Amino acid sequence: MAAAAPDVSAVAAVPDSAWLTPRPEVVRPPEPLQLGGCGRACESPESAVSFLLTQLTSPDAATLLRPLIDWSLLVVDDRDLGTHWAMQWADPAQRAAREAEITAFLAEWTRWPGRSLQADGWGRMRGSGIQLRLQDEQTAVVRLRHPPLRDDATEPVWQLQWHKRGAEWLLSGIDHQPSLRGKQ
């Protein structure tokens, strides 16, 4: 005797939802905005400058400031370091040299707050020595009147240039002698 065929009409009558085990809704917290690495700390020129000045007082300033700088655009005292570092990044064999150069640059540049000759110089600079001007929608210029520094041949007012990259404002220019280059 032949076996009876299964009755599939009963299976078809079961609603699809009965076959699916509902998964609990996964709710993930919003991830912090990060393009260059400084995220929300750099979402406006004002917050980026504040972040820079706060991190400069840290013993680990060189590491903490690394994501705040646009390494492919950085110009320091008319020296186009960014193009050089971008070319090194493009060549995998040069990436270690690039990292070493950036680390050395940051180690040297982040030492300036510790060379202040005035005990209250840092606080006074933060209180009234900073002027920020939007040049256009993508560029901000900051004039920073730093306290007198030991062994300093630069001007008392430096000019920092910030560019917007994506949603972040990153440091792209440092001029220690702006009057010599007509950047007033």
Image: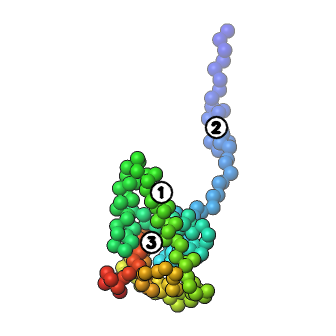
Q: Tell me what residue is drawn at x 62 percent, y 69 percent.
A: 59
Q: Quadrant of the C terminus?
A: bottom left
**Residue placed most toward the observer, 137 or 67:** 67
Name which quarter of the figure residue 116 lies in: bottom right
- Kind of residue indicated by mark 2: Ala
**Residue placed most toward the observer, 86 or 121:** 121
Task: Write down the residue under mark 2.
Answer: 13
- Kind of residue indicated by mark 3: Leu
Task: Write down the residue under mark 1.
Answer: 100
**Residue placed most toward the observer, 131 or 179:** 179
Which one is closest to the eye, mark 2 or mark 3? 3
**Furthest-top residue in view?**
1
Q: Secondary structure at mark 1?
A: helix
CB-based contact (under 8 Å), mark 1 and mark 3 = no
Task: Write down the residue under mark 3.
Answer: 171
Relative vertical location of residue 27 with respect to residue 3 in this rendering, above or below: below
Q: Tell me what residue is drawn at x 37 percent, y 49 percent.
A: 91
